[in-house]
Image: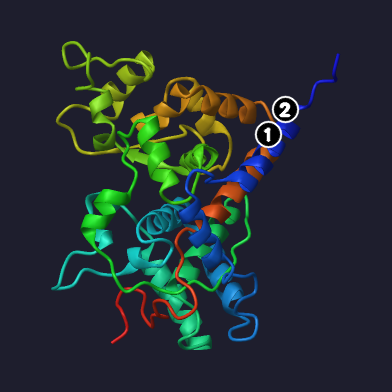
Amino acid sequence: MAAAVPLPVMLLVAVAVMLVGAGAGAAGVRGGRRQQQQQLRMGFYDKSCPAAERIVGDYVRQHVRRVPTVAPALLRTHYHDCFVRGCDGSILLNSTAAGAAEKDAPPNLTLRGFDLIDRVKGLVEQACPGVVSCADVLALAARDAVAAIGGPSWRVPTGRRDGTVSTMQEAVRELPSPSMTFPQLVALFAGKGLDVRDLVWLSGAHTIGIAHCSSFADRLYSYPSAGNGTGTVPPLDAAYAANLRQRKCRMGGRDTTVEMDPGSFLTFDLGYYHTVLKHRALFRSDAALVTDPAARADIAGVVSSPPEVFFQVFARSMARLGAVQVKTGSQGEIRKHCAVVNS
């Protein structure tokens, strides 16, 4: 009888296979993405602005120490940036008389961290005017913020250029919704060159997330088959739902927030996945992860492994996310101020 392979090894082998064969069903997306990635590289600013990454890291760590919630805020902003027009800093642009920008789309109204990115960019501009993109500042800041609260770090090749277009309509269309089904999520991620395991591991960022009651109220009060309008149906745990209705999300009350990983939402750990397996995921999109046998098996495997396994697979998926549809070379521009395009 063959010897059993330790679970962490199985997971890491699976991740390696995933990285080699990612996006096999979307060769065009993958090919273009690879071509753009080749123009990103570690140390892109070593000669043109050698202090850039240190400036970003020092400033972010200083602020995360004082206000730890900066970490999930920056991570979420980077994620939302990459899902609309790629990682090009378009999420940072303000609306103009010509139209509403991404940051004013309903899914982005609770984003935070714009002022911090503006301040970091200002410091970098003082050192090296017109060299470092806002897209790179955001990507580096998100990585450094997560690491500052004890989470994983990951490689962030730089060389991104800033986009000049930002529209609210695209954000509404391209961003994942809390009510999405598993097939819908898989299709959306595939369109970005990301696969099912990227979906599973990137969802783990919710370990440091919070949710507004309005974003999952349907699962508490008006979910199909919810009976008299005060009940809920699986997969949301009934006792947990009752507690939320009584203590946090009262019908007709103000739109309060709930920790997605109760008790440790500022600790980057496996708590979110335990919550999902206990049917206490707030979003339908999170609960949907366990409706797919392979995704459920991956989650069960990672929660029974050392935390370092989750850190490694999350870091790899974050590196892949950070390369989605990037602008490089002569594309886009290097914005002087992240909130406005250059004049």
Between the residue at mark 1 and the residue at mark 2, the CA separation in whole angstroms equals 6 Å
**The C terminus - image quarter:** bottom left
* Secondary-structure class at tag 1: helix
* Residue at image mark 2: 7
Q: Residue at x 22, y 50 (%)?
A: 106
* Image x and y of residue 193, in percent: 48, 50
Please determine whether, in this image, residue 211 is positioned above or below residue 129. Answer: above
- In which quarter of the view is residue 168 placed? bottom left
Q: Is residue 200 left or right of residue 10?
A: left
Q: Is residue 153 left or right of residue 1?
A: left
Q: Which mark is residue 119?
A: none
Determine crowd level at label 2: few under 14, some 14-19, many 20+ residues with C-alpha closer than 10 A. Answer: some
- In which quarter of the view is residue 300 placed? top right
Given contact means CB atoms under 8 Å apart, are the residues at marks 1 and 2 in contact?
A: yes
The amino acid beneath tag 1 is Leu
Q: Which mark is residue 11?
A: 1
Determine crowd level at label 1: few under 14, some 14-19, many 20+ residues with C-alpha closer than 10 A. Answer: some
* Secondary-structure class at tag 2: helix
* Image x and y of residue 298, in percent: 59, 29
Q: Residue at x 47, y 55 (%)?
A: 28
Q: Nearer the viewer, residue 99 or 269?
A: 99
Please determine whether, in this image, residue 298 is positioned above or below residue 69. Answer: above
Residue 306 visible (yes or no):
yes
The amino acid beneath tag 2 is Leu
